Amino acid sequence: MRSSAANTKTNWWKYGVIYQIYPRSFMDSNRDGVGDLQGVIEKMDYLNDGTKNSLGVDALWLSPIFPSPMADFGYDVADYCDIDPLFGNLATFDRLVAEAHRRNMKVILDYVPNHTSDRHPWFIESRSDRKNPRRDWYIWRDAKPDGSLPNNWGSAFGGPAWEWDERTGQYYLHSFLKEQPELNWRNADMKAAMLDVLRFWMERGVDGFRMDVVGMLLKDPQLRDNPISKENPGPAHPNNLYYRQQHIHDQDLDEVHAIIREIRAVLDEYPERCGIGELWYALPRWIRYYGIHGDELQLPFNFRLMNQPWNARAIRQSVDELEEALPEFAWPNYVLSNHDAQRLVSRVGEKQARVAAMLLLTLRGTPTLYYGEELGMENAVIAADQMQDPQGLRLGTDQSRDYGRTPMQWTDGPFSGFSTIKPWLPLTQNYREKNVAAENSDPASMLNLFRTLIHFRKEHPVLQSGSYLPVDGESEDCFVFERIGDDEVYLVALNFSNKETSVHLPDGLTGQILVSTYLDGSLLLIRDDLKLRNDEGVILKVANNTAARQDE
Ligand code: GLC
């Protein structure tokens, strides 16, 4: 059980709510069917206008907006220090930062350090000649003597991770598409150039970076084969080498932490900048990305709740394990969906998505939400010939990430108010009911639930910084915990089932329900037993705090 005083002036990444924008799909201001930065600016009041009418988020993370051939929709960067014309230009970006800051929102960019686009000038030089000074900025290897691939590594998007370059007679490594050649972080000049990219954006006012596959930056120098995974020996798709392997030689190397410390040192050249990492590893390996001395990332993304079966026991266990494992200096965080995942509603159901919203916004740790999650947007139905995502196109339509990347739903009008022409991906089927305009006028909508919870968290600093104490509520369908501050205690009780249930509260506890996920204002006084309706979560203000109860 741990707590730390809320300090809203520093460590903004601990106390705020992060909102992920997938810029292609947020708002199209120039009517080309693809979202853009001007669109984000136009919708900024929706995100935070300083009042409770807006969502009230504190930081915007923009998925990649840099010049790119878009083979992987921006995760193939052709210039790290500019904006793709599809999204705007540096002047638009500067305005976006100013507009965000004016509303007290931070701006987080996506830093893609593991690979560039094959059209990046660095790679064009690198592949031009074996003697080119930039040859070593990427990972080139000869074929084995029998002409075969340098090793058995697979690409996450299917097939081997090596591509033959006819002209210079070597293979280059790509853990994703062949259009995404792997950078060589063992090359000092390349490393210096990539660290300068961080400075370039921080000079423009960027407050933090979400770092793409940051655990993959170093590879085994001997390029040894990965062992085949015992858990997953056969792929769902024949093209799938990657998921059949244990990734002990192509990622999460011990040495990578030295690089991440260097990245952090660059962030620390500027005040209050935050490093967030995309890291999928098991808890003991994952936790190391905070740095043994807290000198790596402030927020290694915690995706554990996305992989759990959706029931009270599994979710509590995941939270408890994290709380247990974190060293004193490490701050927790939680994510329920993102641009690589299914929509939350499609995963857990609409009613449980409300319980999930309360969970996310009451746990100890920074919440990140994904655009449209606040509307209860669901996976879209997308015909095979409309699929865009390279992962789905290579590994099968069930692996497509398009379902959760569809246009934001602003109104029930044509193209949901996102654009005036056909958007790059289809809308979800129920956008006429699930959109900002409709949900604004429904007091119990998902949008109003998110707003209520975000503002409640803001107004009750105990929810931001109080310690976490799980409570045994004697109901296997419920996850119950307290958030404990110096003078105040809140109790959160979440019913993960579709049945009514009763939670036994700690002896002697009395309190009042302040928020229910039903948003129906039942401000009941509670003593001993708490009745929860099906799929209901509640936040209770405890009248007599834990210490006082223990004395009783
Ligand atoms: C990360 C991104 C994903 C992208 C991949 C390659 O996993 O989240 O969208 O395709 O890296 O950059």
Image (cartoon, rainbow, N blue to C red):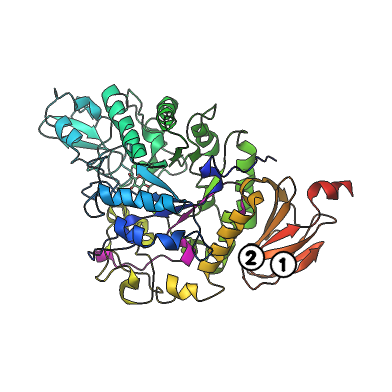
Mark 1 and ligand 1: say if the CB distance to the nearest ligand atom is below 8 Å.
no
Percent of width and height locating residue 29? 28, 63
Residue 372 visible, this angle: no
Residue shown at 29% from the left, 60% from the top: 35
Query: Does residue 321 appear left or right of residue 34 in this picture?
Result: right
Q: CA distance from mark 2 to mark 1?
A: 8 Å
Please say if 312 is above or below 303.
Answer: below
Query: Does residue 160 appear left or right of residue 166 in this picture?
Result: right
Element type at mark 1: strand
Please say if 351 is above or below 243.
Answer: below
Percent of width and height locating residue 25? 33, 60
Residue shown at 24% from the left, 28% from the top: 137
Give the residue at the far right of this rendering.
Answer: 552
Q: Give the labeled residue for mark 1.
A: 501
Mark 2 and ligand 1: say if the CB distance to the nearest ligand atom is below 8 Å.
no
Percent of width and height locating residue 84? 23, 49
The answer to if 338 sits in the magenta stretch is no
The answer to if 373 sits in the magenta stretch is yes
Residue shown at 67% from the left, 41% from the top: 3
Please say if 413 is above or below 243.
Answer: below
Task: Name the amino acid, label 2.
Answer: Ser
Q: Read off the magenta span.
A: 362-386
Q: Give the labeled residue for mark 2.
A: 497
Camera-side residue: 191 or 385? 191
